[in-house]
Image (cartoon, grey):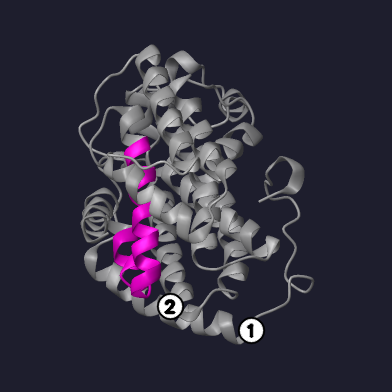
Amino acid sequence: MQDLAAYSETTIRQGSKSFAKAAMLFDAETRASVMMLYAWCRHCDDVIDGQALGHGLQALTPEQKLLQLGLLRQETERVCAGHGSDIPAFAALQQVVRKHGIARRHLFDLLDGFAMDAEEARFITLDDTLRYCYHVAGVVGVMMARIMGAEDEDVIHRASDLGIAFQLTNISRDVMDDLSIGRCYLPEEWLAAKGIPREELQLPAHRDSLHALASELVELAERYYDSARVGIAHLPWRCAWAISSALLIYRDIGLQVRKAGTHAWDGRTQVSGSRKLWRLCHGSVMATHALSRRQSADMAPSRAGLWTRAGNEA
């Protein structure tokens, strides 16, 4: 267990500096499970993209990606069936599944998101983009909430909303990086409305229009962040503090992208170390305020208009 814990801590520290800061705030038991789940998610993402901890992208063909995805599905199925694994990320996942009863469908929802990338899916409508956001990030929020002891379905949906908000932020930040490897997660209907042909997406003439669309995603993310705040009020104090801090740090990324205009893509938009520390303090205040105003699900602000998994099942 100690080796898995060390492996998982190294993975999150190198793979996501923003979330690693917030994860320090969890109690030790929750932090261990959160980090082990993250290690598996990071491993699967890296395998599909030919990366190591989010870095060193290698160009894999769609056929190679689908082959790797098949192996990931196979090993995940083994873990769900109760078998051990020699792969550290899957051994870590097994610990989490056993301890918290993570449902099989959540694990395979995430793998379905990676399949969208492997199959080079196109995103015609906003609903297509939001569905992708759920599969690669919203469902991670669901699993994290389960680890934190959340059982109420409305709270679980709010956790999904936070993951979707994170991914919308990521998309807005990474527009040009994604285009450089042939990906675009902006809805094609939005591109058409701006008069941007797919084959001209990388032309400098369209940079202002692309930034306007990225800013629309930042605005949309605000609605999902607002919804997530409701769910935070129903978490244990240390969890509420950690998740509030993560929300504030990630939200800052999107706000910086919007404020910087097209210069946001001159380099990778990041939150400075000092501002992250300030957000950790702010997260404590936000969590305290949220817990003091805890509302029952039937009194909480409605999620009307926000994307929800088919069947209304979180």
| Residue 250 higher or lower than 125, as above or below | below
Q: Which mark is residue 123?
A: none
Image quarter of residue 263: top left
Task: Residue 204: give x, y in percent of width and height.
Answer: 35, 25
Residue at point 23%, 65% (across, down): 273
Q: Secondary structure at mark 1?
A: loop
Task: Locate the N terminus and report the quarter of the image it occupies.
Answer: bottom left
Q: Which residues are magenta?
A: 19-44
Residue at point 25%, 32% (across, down): 51
Q: Nearer the viewer, residue 242 or 311?
A: 311
Q: Is residue 311 magenta?
A: no
Report the magenta stretch's main SS.
helix
Q: Which residue is mark 1?
A: 293
Q: Which residue is mark 2?
A: 238
Residue 218 seen by the camera = no
Q: Are marks 1 and 2 in contact (CB under 8 Å)?
A: no
